Amino acid sequence: MLPFKLIYSGAYYLPIGQHVFPAEKYKRIHDQLLAEGIAEADDFLEPQPATDQDILLVHKPEYVHKLKTGTLTPREELEMEIPYSPELVEAFWLAAGGSILAARHALTDGVGISIGGGFHHAFPDHGEGFCVIHDVAVAIRRLQRDDKIRTAMTVDCDVHQGNGTAAIFAGTRTASALLPSAGASTLDSSTLNSALPGKIRGAHAGDVFTISLHQHNNYPMWKPPSSIDVDLPDGIGDDDYLAWLDNALSSGLRQFEPDLLCYVAGADPYREDQLGGLSLTIEGLKRRDELVFHVARTRNIPVMVTYAGGYAEKVEDTVTIHCNTVIAAKEIFVVTK
Ligand SMILES: [Zn+2]
């Protein structure tokens, strides 16, 4: 048995029909984890949907009302880029419940993984980019309300910038500014800057510190400032990516001490992704997961994981990348525990 829980429900499936978002990926990940003996049936916990009260900790009442009554405007539906249905709304309430449960288990077990969620493009008053409800933000606000945590850090490694996350937690943020060069990182940032046109920028003054590592030249067009944004150039590969991630984590954790780390483990930095333009390998993505887990483990910061995007030409690649996240957690949290 795993020393942590996997949060999953068959009802994570998003009823969106044929779509670039492979809604069947959640079930396929679940099945592959069992088939390959990575997890056992008892490792999985079934979440309950979030309550409306939970959702309202992040989202505007008008928006929640529209979702529940099917009264979004055509323009609002279009912006979500997935077809509205009452069943879709249920799936997002469940994803938020799954993230709450994963976060709770992270606090007791060191790590908790939801085989779903990571809908980082949802804003308080609207959905976009396949995201209706910001499940991670709901989980953070719920745990804060329950006095389980005071602070949190989001580490968003989906290839697309976490615009919803940045907007939701921007309340007390100061204007974005260039960060001073990193000192304690394993990587000399002056070398990085001369080797790559990527940029690291940020500023922070809130209770939730947001890090987003993403392809600059990709959706969303408008990128509201995170605490740290790493704007990566097109086509960067494993080693450069991992160096930037290491640098951003070191920088963030020098500035901020989170009670919970929320890792958004998107599979779309993969080099064969249809909606991404970076060049990471499947192995490189696993090293990315290991890096995040290693940093959290050595600093005793609980990690909750959500899966976000993944649009590989072959769905099995997306499934493998997500399964590897569980393997990485197993390696880091079993061996060193
Ligand atoms: Zn994405």
Image (spheres, helix red, strand yellow):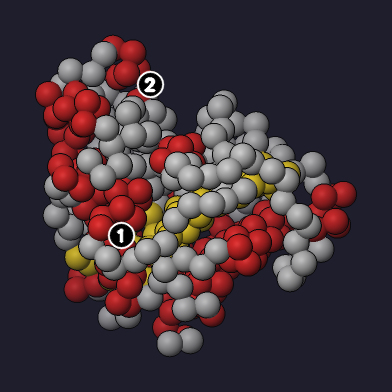
Q: Is mark 1 within 8 Å of ligand 1?
A: no
The earlier-in-sequence mark between 1 and 2 is 2
Question: What is the distance, in whole Å, between disc 1 and disc 2 at their CAs?
Answer: 30 Å
Task: Give me the residue at 32% from left, 29% from top.
Answer: 125
Q: Is residue 143 above or below residue 110?
A: above
Residue 188: tell me if it is visible: yes
Mark 1 nearby-residue class (10 Å; few <14, some 14–19, many ≥20): some
Mark 2 nearby-residue class (10 Å; few <14, some 14–19, many ≥20): some
Which mark's residue is nearer the viewer, 1 or 2?
Answer: 1
Q: Is residue 169 left or right of residue 249?
A: left
Task: Give me the residue at 32% from left, 77% from top.
Answer: 109
Which element carries disc 2, helix, strand or loop?
helix
Q: Position of residue 102 (x, y in %)?
A: 29, 63
Q: Look at the image and tell me in which quarter the C terminus lies.
A: bottom left
Q: Is residue 150 above or below residue 125?
A: below
What residue sits right under mark 2 in the picture? 79
Marks 1 & 2, CB-CB < 8 Å contact: no
- Amino acid type, residue under disc 1 in the picture: Gln
Task: Give me the residue at 18% from left, 18% from top.
Answer: 71
Task: Give me the residue at 39% from left, 28% from top.
Answer: 128
Q: In front here: 311 or 206?
A: 206
Which element carries disc 1, helix, strand or loop?
helix
What residue sits right under mark 1 in the picture? 144
Quarter residue 7 falls in = bottom left
- Amino acid type, residue under disc 2 in the picture: Glu
Q: Look at the image and tell me in which quarter the N terminus lies.
A: bottom left
Quarter residue 174 falls in = top right
Q: Is residue 286 left or right of residue 25?
A: right
Q: Which mark is residue 208?
A: none
Residue 158: tell me if it is visible: no
